[in-house]
Amino acid sequence: MRFLCLHGAGTNGEILEIQTGGLRHSLEKNGHTFQFMNGKLGAKVEEELEGVVDGPFYNHYARGDSPGSGVAEAFEHTKAIIATEGPFDGVLGFSQGAALAASLIINHNKTRPADPPLFRVAVFICGARPWEANGTQHVVRSGEERPIGIVTANIVGKQDPLYPESMELYELCEPSKASFYDHGSKHMVPFDLKNTGEMVRVIEEAIGKAVKG
């Protein structure tokens, strides 16, 4: 499968490429490919990466309590890349990138229900809460309805400050189509052999479900 990859806030596509190197090594051996894009909004680098990696750095939309129209602009930026460089079978997002991917999937399903989904599978790693298109409120569940109906792989970290948000994102996914793994660590993509193997397993499990339809 071919994946579009969305980085976290205050980083860039090259950094996500490095962060996911262990995962991709195994997945690429199985024939999967990954394309990395940058957000459109210039940003200050994440504090722990300052002086360690080169910029420029980006957000997909402004951080904070209400990114407003920036969410819709991020939708258009991402859809333009899909139109020019796609199609993509799947999407992989880390942190803000996972939130953007989820928001985009939900909005597409809501506004164009008769169209095929944007992706067959989504991989959310340490994801933040997704936003409604207006950028003023987060997506919330309505009863038993799960607004993300495609196959997903949900990877979270128990020590991650965004862990509660990652779990909220997981709760938005159709349970029968959602694979899950808690790597038990912080806001990161672990690179040790055990966690890498387990993350690859849940991603391949999700890919398998998507292929079977």
Image (cartoon, rainbow, N blue to C red):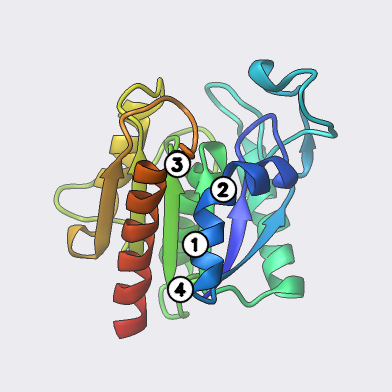
Residue lying at the far front of the rendered structure = 193
Disc 2 or 4, which lies upstream in sequence?
2
Asked if residue 160 lies left or right of residue 82, the reply is left
> Whole-Å distance between the Cαs marked 3 and 4?
17 Å
Few, some or many C-alpha atoms within 10 Å of disc 3 (few <14, some 14-19, many ≥20)?
many
Q: Which residue is mark 2?
A: 20
Q: Which residue is mark 3?
A: 130
Above or below residue 79? Residue 86 is: below
x and y percentages locating residue 145 in the rendered image: 20, 55
> Whole-Å distance between the Cαs marked 2 and 4?
25 Å
Q: Which numbered dot is residue 117?
A: 4
Q: Amino acid at mark 2?
A: Thr
Residue occupying the point 77% across, 44% down: 40
Q: Secondary structure at mark 3?
A: loop
- Residues under numbered marks 3 and 2 in contact, where contact means CB atoms less than 8 Å apart: no
Q: Amino acid at mark 4?
A: Pro
Q: Quadrant of residue 110?
A: bottom left
Above or below residue 191? Residue 154 is: below
Residue occupying the point 48% across, 50% down: 103
